[in-house]
Amino acid sequence: MLTLENLDDSTPFVGRHNVETGPVTIINTFVAPEGKTDEVLAAWAADAQYMKDTGNLLAVQLYRGIGGSRLFTNVAVWKSPAALRAAFN
């Protein structure tokens, strides 16, 4: 339903997971397909709960544009790049 695209080709998203550091914040923005907003919200909520249950997702929040916008911004704080990498695997 949604696709992951690199905005910065100099450092691919997956390649950034190889850094060893403390907590890492991921911010991603997406537009829900027309007529699919409820499905996207349900999928986001289920994924967020699953990730929280791992104990590696420290905080997560979804923001939505106003006025019926289908634009969303997800902000997630992970324990470490390794924790984020594990979630994507």
Image: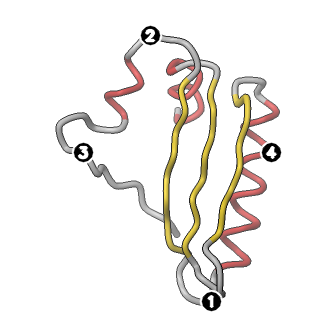
Q: Residue 9 carries which label?
A: none
* Disc with the residue nearer the chain's start (3 vs 2): 3
Say which residue label 3 marks. Answer: 8
Distance between mark 3 and mark 4 Cα atoms: 28 Å
Q: Looking at the image, which residue is at 63% across and 82% down? A: 36
Q: Looking at the image, which residue is at 41% across and 24% down? A: 17
* Disc with the residue nearer the chain's start (1 vs 3): 3
Say which residue label 1 marks. Answer: 35
* Disc with the residue nearer the chain's start (1 vs 2): 2
Say which residue label 2 marks. Answer: 20
Residue 32 to residue 86: above or below = below
Amino acid under label 3? Asp
Check contact, mark 3 vs mark 2: CB within 8 A. Answer: no
Check contact, mark 4 vs mark 1: CB within 8 A. Answer: no
Say which residue label 4 marks. Answer: 49
x and y percent of residue 42 in the render? Answer: 76, 66
Amino acid under label 2? Glu
